[in-house]
Image: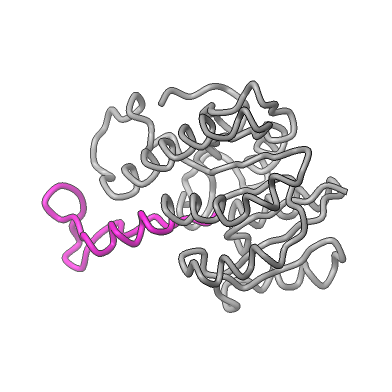
Amino acid sequence: MKTVLITGANRGIGLALTKQFLAQDYQVHATYRSVSTSQELLTLEQEHQRLQLYRLDVTQYDDVATFAKGLPTIDIVINNAGYYGPKKDQSNHIGLGHTDPEEWRRVFEVNTIAPLKLVEMLYPKLQASSVKKIICLSSKVGSMTENTSGGGYIYRSSKAALNSVVKSLSNDLTNQGFTVLALHPGWVQTAMGGPNALISTQTSAQGLFSVIQSAQTEDSGRFLNFDGKALPW
């Protein structure tokens, strides 16, 4: 039975991915940060013996190291946990001239640093697998080419940096049999994406699952949409 680890699985895309992998007979290890926002996930654990949950803040690296050591061999890791940061400040401002440096640091910590640290700590567990897939959920807003509207300095830069991490990981690990991908989940109806988004979490998760399943080492280092189409860096 193949094993997947999904971070930030308590809601939105993470929860939908958890359900998708369970439906495909995976052993799923999933993390969440807050009990109060994880009731559906906690209920799901009671219904599935193949689901193991862990309360974890992915930015607490000593805790992450202890957590990683206790895991079995992991075939696929999905860095899904993410943080958008402020959409408006206390004065109802956002954008140029109103960037909050503390929030910027927090967004980078969650979206860029934590995914790399998790991969570093999970490396022995991934190395022991014959699958060796590292998936980072990124965003088209992190694409330099796609940025034609400006703004979004904090979130955009964190995802652009994550894309750079993915590219470097692919250069370092592909010759060891790893497949490393940056995936855009689409504009999804979540707390982050908002009610006007174009697709449901289920549609996104189904597409992401298909891309992850079909990806081979020759795809390593690519930036792909949830439907498998290539995206520009």
Expressed as whole percent of the image width and height from the top left, the position of residue 131 reads 75, 38
Expressed as whole percent of the image width and height from the top left, the position of residue 175 reads 62, 28
- Looking at this rendering, what residue extends furthest in the bottom direction? 36
Magenta stretch, main secondary structure, is loop
Q: Check the picture and name the quadrant holding the C terminus.
A: top left
Expressed as whole percent of the image width and height from the top left, the position of residue 88 reads 25, 59
Image color mode: one colour
Residue visible at 60% across and 67% down in the picture:
32
Residue visible at 58% across and 40% down in the picture:
199
Residue 101 lies in quadrant: bottom left
Give yes or no for residue 137 being in the magenta stretch: no
Q: Is residue 78 above or below residue 150?
A: below
Q: Closer to the camera, 114 or 224? A: 114
Give yes or no for residue 95 being in the magenta stretch: yes
Residue visible at 54% across and 32% down in the picture:
170
Q: Is residue 77 above or below residue 33?
A: above
Task: Locate residue 230 relative to residue 16 in the image: left or right.
Answer: left
Task: Locate residue 21 relative to residue 91 in the image: left or right.
Answer: right
Q: Closer to the camera, 141 or 158? A: 158
Residue visible at 21% across and 54% down in the picture:
94
For the magenta stretch, what is the residue range? 81-110
